[in-house]
Amino acid sequence: MKELKFLGVGSGFNTALGSTAAYFIEGETLFLIDCGESAYARINELGLLKDIDCINFFCTHTHSDHIGSAGNLLLDCKWRSHITFNLICPTNADHFNDIVNILNGFGGKNAYSVIDPALLDHTYKSFTSVRYKPTRHGECKAAYSLVFYTDEGAVFYSGDSETMGFAEELIMGGAKIKHMYFDVSSNVNSDCHLPLPNLYRLMPEQFRGRTTCMHFDSEKAIVMAKSMGFNVAEAERGKHE
Ligand SMILES: [Zn+2]
Ligand SMILES: [Zn+2]
């Protein structure tokens, strides 16, 4: 898997940077991680639907900055672009029913299929498997991180999380790690996003170059992340070629 691309890198209230959502494309399939309020507009602006015939959609949790425009994307796929839309999520995940209710409420009933992540094992070149891992995100009681296992190591995507979550297990367990993406906060007292000083303290130095921060609540968070030696996610610009 190449590095993830981003449609936006902002937090829920930092609309200037867009809703944090990531993607990669393999062949004619778009793998989309979250689809918050601004994501559908960016997908259109980048022309991402032009050459694909399938979207595999992952949803970390149902805060609006992570699912807010998924309904419009789904309806576009069904009625305009004629693209297969798959919700990749275990049916026993705590947020599964919420996602389904939202997509159906947006008018998308019967417009998508549900696929368990395990059914994608060894199906694509970009990764061998992908799994949802429960995490803690303030008062949101159903939040998940994602981990893609690739030949080059695990790719961890925090979603919204107040801790390093499953990434700590990967590190402590000596797993081969390709890259890690974390939502961060410049607020040292944040109890729903990972305070940057915590990430700096907990992340072994040798992994900092393989760590990318995202979901920025402020310019200060970006400056802080860079000064700590972390990579900083940037939204894709211009038109997709
Ligand atoms: Zn968020
Ligand atoms: Zn959230």
Image: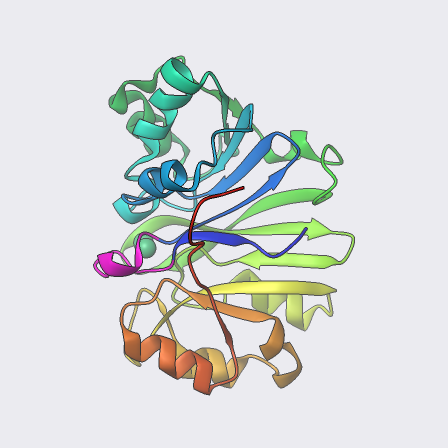
Q: Is 240 in front, or is 103?
A: 240
Question: Residue 146's x, y, as percent?
Answer: 54, 50
Q: Tell me which corner region of the image, top left, top right, bottom left or bottom right, holds residue 130.
A: top right
For the magenta stretch, what is the residue range? 9-19
Q: Residue placed farthest to the right in the image?
A: 151
* Residue 65, x across and y down, in percent: 29, 48
In this rendering, the answer to whether 223 lies above or below 73 is: below
Task: Pick whichever, 218 or 169, lies toward us.
Answer: 218
Name which residue lies at 73% across and 51% down.
150
Picture layout, residue 33 above or below residue 184: above
Quick check: is 12 in the magenta stretch?
yes
By secondary structure, the bulk of the magenta-drawn segment is best described as: loop
Please name the residue shown 44% across and 68% down the image: 163
User: Where's ligand 2: which quadrant?
Assistant: bottom left
- In the image, taking residue 79 as reference, residue 202 lies left or right, namely right
* Residue 157: percent from left, percent from top: 52, 56
